[in-house]
Image (cartoon, helix red, strand yellow):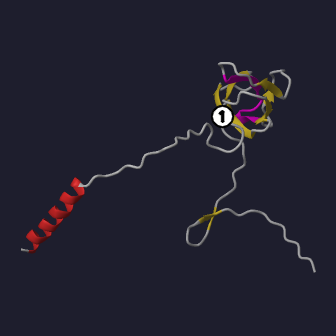
Amino acid sequence: MKQLYIFCILLLVFSHAVGADVKVPVSQKAHVAKCVKPGAPVQITYESEHIDVGVVGKVDIVLTTQVSEGTMKVVVKTDKGLDDVTGTEKPLFFELGKSATKEYPVQVEVSSAEDGLYYVKLIVSIKGQGMRAFAVPVYVGEGVSKAEKKPVTKTSSGEAISVSAAQESIEE
């Protein structure tokens, strides 16, 4: 009897829920974000060759922006151990116009005497719009990062912690 009673109550609640009109809120104004992050509204696409030690390789970078006025300044730097052999003037300047293309290509030629993972770093700024930093990976030889990894220390409960060197000075 209890089961029949519970079944009838569930059936009654379900029938009201199915028959009810559900009103979906209507957006009155749509906003499409051109760039999600704060800073210059610039996007990047790139193609980076995996190069051998001592060989010159190309890194093709395309910067895209919807800004149609002003000048875009691009500062290109490479990691220590990665040589920029492009020979172009730095920084680069692009006049932003109302042309159909909003793409601005940057080609960098790099070489390294040691294998590893390196980065070509770009700092892009547009006056009045802010700035943005990008890093493009370049794999040389084996392509393994040479960054020194710190040993992981664990507490008595097994939690991994990072121990950093610190200097303490006491002033009286």
- The answer to which of 31 and 39 lies nearer the viewer is 31
| Residue 79 position by quadrant | top right
Q: Can residue 59 be seen by looking at this rendering?
A: no
Residue that numbered label 1 is attached to:
143
Image quadrant in which you'd find residue 125: top right
Magenta-span inclusion, residue 140 = no
At 66% from the left edge and 38% from the top edge, which residue is drawn? 144
Q: Is residue 152 above or below residue 53?
A: below
Q: Is residue 142 above or below residue 156?
A: above
* Residue 66 location, quadrant: top right
Residue at horizontal 78%, vertical 24%?
94
Q: Which residue is drawn at 72% across and 45% down?
A: 147
Q: Where is residue 146 in the image (x, y as percent from the top left)?
A: 72, 42
The front one of 88 and 170 is 88
| Crowd around label 1: few <14 · some 14–19 · many ≥20 (10 Å) | some
Residue type at mark 1 is Gly
Start and end of the magenta stretch?
A: 102-123
Query: Looking at the image, which residue sits at the far front?
Result: 28
Between 108 and 118, the one lying in front of the other is 108
Is residue 109 within the magenta segment? yes
Given the current orientation, which residue lies at the most extreme left position? Answer: 1
Image coords of residue 45 (percent x, y): 63, 29
Q: Is residue 49 left or right of residue 157?
A: right
> Which residue is the extreme one toward the bottom?
172
